[in-house]
Image: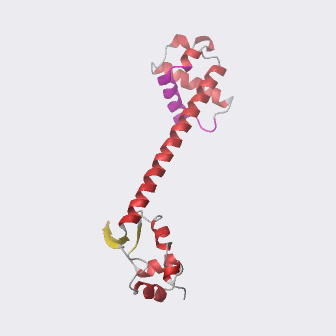
Amino acid sequence: MPDGATGRAGGGPEPLFIARKQNPVGSLPGNDGMLAKLLRVDLAAWQDLQARCVSPLHGWSIYTVNGKQVLGHSVVIEVALDALTKRVAREASNDERAVKMRQVRLREAMIDIGCEVSLTNDEILVERLDTWLMENHIGQRRMPKFERSLSRALGQAVAQSWMDAAQVRGRNC
């Protein structure tokens, strides 16, 4: 049987790698059988490792989360939460970039169908049109289908008083 200190047979970093993917983040199951299975170690070998002076779970404590006992390590939890926070921030940033790029393409499409540049410079109008299109246009934003959806969005903009009806006449939006 490999030595637990070498990073094999349940020792080393394996518990850390498993903990970062658990729910709650940074935790491990409080059950030896489940832990052994997650670590792909025979239960007897896992219990032998746990019986050592410095076990693979040295520094881990028992927590109760939603009525269920789990193991947690303060440093592992801190690192996992930090990584989760960064991932959420990165996803939000990506979402913001996607919205900005979608709105740039919307402005280009508005010009392509004959809207005046002054309308495409109206941030609030473009945001409202983009939101309406996200909720009502199905599929990719490709002409000519998108042109029909954009025309409907512009009609909605007039109906909701987001813009003046005179701006839409004659396809000058």
Residue 125 on the magenta span: yes
Residue 24 vs residue 156, the one in the foreground = 24
In the image, is 166 to the left or to the right of 160? Answer: right
| Residue at (52, 27) in percent of width and height | 129
| Residue at (54, 21) in percent of width and height | 155
**Residue sticking out furthest to the right:** 144
In the rendered image, the vertical position of residue 43 relative to residue 63, given as above or below: below
Q: What's the magenta bit mostly, secondary-structure-wise?
A: helix
Q: Is residue 149 visible?
A: no
Q: Position of residue 161 (x, y in %)?
A: 45, 18
Residue 149 vs residue 83, the one in the foreground = 83
Q: How is the image coloured?
A: secondary structure
Residue 166 vs residue 51, the one in the foreground = 51
Number of dots carrying numbers: 0
Q: Position of residue 59 (x, y in %)?
A: 36, 74
Residue 1 on the magenta span: no
| Residue at (62, 11) in percent of width and height | 170
In the rendered image, the vertical position of residue 127 relative to residue 119, given as above or below: below
Q: Is residue 125 visible?
A: yes
Where the C terminus falls, by quadrant? Answer: top right
Segment colored magenta: 120-140
Residue 154 vs residue 115, the one in the foreground = 115
Where the N terminus falls, by quadrant? Answer: bottom right
Q: Quadrant of residue 119?
A: top right
In the rendered image, the vertical position of residue 64 relative to residue 48, given as above or below: above
Q: Position of residue 13 (x, y in %)?
A: 49, 72
Q: Position of residue 58 (x, y in %)?
A: 38, 77
| Residue at (51, 13) in percent of width and height | 165
